[in-house]
Image: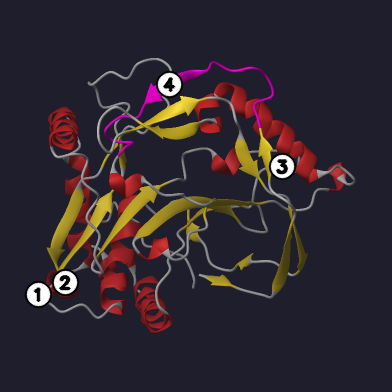
């Protein structure tokens, strides 16, 4: 959870930031995974850094601008434009080097302060299970209503199909853990954890091939979303917490979604004032539901491990809200 304080943001005029060196001008096709209708959106990220006395006087905007321009040399498709392909409703990337939109902004007064944090030793499955049950109760879903967690699973290390060198796209599948709301209410948390573990375990070679074939044959249908379902992804190991522009490692690097995070949540790394690493999971819900969500999470974090989950190999969430 986070505590908001007032601040004012002043935006400068947008500018196009191009790669620092010439890049190949070519057309790249999007894979069927990347071209899903459900992925045609912007995913907003934000990085927080502490003031560093060693770099006082250095212009952070100039440093970031130069670093991004250098990065675009290696990731030049990001500086291109989406264009329609020969097939209906199929996009490609025109790697034309036109650049990305860059907007300088100044923030005055106090900014966002993170006040709650999931410890690093909490497991992904356990944290997600806690959020799943607390969110379901917070939304007051009917006991017969279906609720699900769609897990975003990286399959780059799970065997064929082998990805070509230079492939820039996603290599993910979306297995889902599904149950009735009353089963989440009536069973210990271990039940939800097992469902999530089983869903992730289905992402084997056969599942990957089946999903890729399904996408191709069904025209890349959108990911199903509903009030009782949400998508979860783990950004904590993607390296956002290690991005150093000269001010050291960030306090937080991850999602800043608001409206869309009602159905998409992301695990990200966070550092507290003592420099200790942890996992933070932003969750956005309507105000009345958020109040109930906080109450449910407080109940879970107040229990002993044996009262929350049966298997001793899993640790209890030790975060405070």
Q: Which mark is residue 27?
A: 4
Q: CA distance from mark 2 to mark 4?
A: 46 Å
The answer to the question of whether label 2 and label 1 lie on touching residues, with beta carbons closer than 8 A, is: yes
Mark 4 burial class by Cα count in 10 Å: few <14, some 14-19, many 20+: some
Q: What residue sits 69% from the left and 75% below the top?
A: 6
Q: Can the viewer see residue 311? A: no
Residue 318 visible in the displayed image? yes
Task: Work out which residue is located at the far bottom of the displayed protein and give it.
Answer: 288
Q: Residue at x 31, y 29 (%)?
A: 31
Cα distance, mark 2 to mark 1?
6 Å
| Residue at image mark 3 | 248
Relative to 112, residue 232 above or below? above
- Number of dots carrying numbers: 4
How far separated are the C-alphas under marks 4 and 1? 49 Å
Query: Looking at the rendering, which quadrant does residue 2 occupy?
Result: bottom right
Measuring from the top left, give residue 259's x and y in whole percent.
43, 66
Mark 3 element type: loop
Q: Give the secondary structure at mark 4.
A: strand
Where are the magenta residues, as a range? 18-35
Assign a secondary structure to mark 2.
helix
On the image, the x and y values in percent for residue 164 come to 35, 16
Specify the label residue 181 is tagged with.
2
Task: Quickly name the residue at label 1.
Answer: 144
Q: Is residue 37 left or right of residue 99?
A: left
* Sequence-first disc among 3 and 2: 2
Give the label, 4 or 1, closer to the camera. Answer: 4
């Amino acid at each position: 959870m986070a505590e908001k304080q007032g601040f004012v943001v002043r935006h400068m005029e947008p500018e196009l930031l191009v790669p620092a060196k010439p890049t190949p001008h070519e057309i790249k096709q999007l894979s069927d995974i990347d071209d899903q209708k459900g992925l045609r959106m912007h995913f907003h990220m934000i990085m927080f850094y502490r003031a560093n006395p060693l770099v006082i006087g250095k212009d952070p905007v100039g440093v970031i601008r130069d670093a991004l321009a250098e990065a675009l040399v290696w990731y030049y498709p990001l500086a291109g434009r989406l264009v329609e392909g020969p097939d209906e409703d199929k996009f490609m990337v025109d790697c034309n080097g036109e650049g990305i939109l860059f907007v300088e902004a100044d923030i005055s007064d106090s900014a966002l302060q993170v006040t709650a944090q999931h410890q690093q030793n909490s497991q992904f499955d356990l944290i997600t299970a806690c959020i799943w049950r607390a969110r379901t109760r917070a939304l007051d879903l009917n006991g017969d209503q279906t609720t699900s967690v769609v897990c975003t699973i990286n399959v780059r290390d799970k065997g064929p199909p082998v990805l070509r060198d230079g492939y820039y796209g996603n290599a993910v599948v979306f297995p889902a853990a599904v149950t009735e709301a009353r089963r989440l209410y009536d069973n210990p948390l271990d039940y939800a954890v097992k469902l999530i573990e089983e869903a992730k375990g289905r992402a084997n070679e056969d599942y990957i091939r089946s999903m890729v074939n399904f996408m191709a044959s069904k025209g890349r249908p959108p990911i199903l979303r509903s009030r009782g379902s949400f998508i979860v992804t783990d950004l904590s190991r993607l390296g956002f917490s290690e991005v150093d522009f000269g001010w050291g490692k960030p306090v937080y690097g991850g999602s800043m979604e608001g409206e869309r995070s009602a159905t998409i949540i992301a695990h990200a790394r966070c550092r507290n004032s003592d420099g200790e690493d942890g996992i933070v999971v932003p969750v956005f819900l309507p105000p009345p539901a958020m109040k109930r969500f906080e109450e449910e999470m407080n109940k879970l974090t107040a229990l002993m491990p044996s009262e929350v989950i049966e298997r001793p190999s899993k640790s209890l969430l030790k975060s405070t809200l």
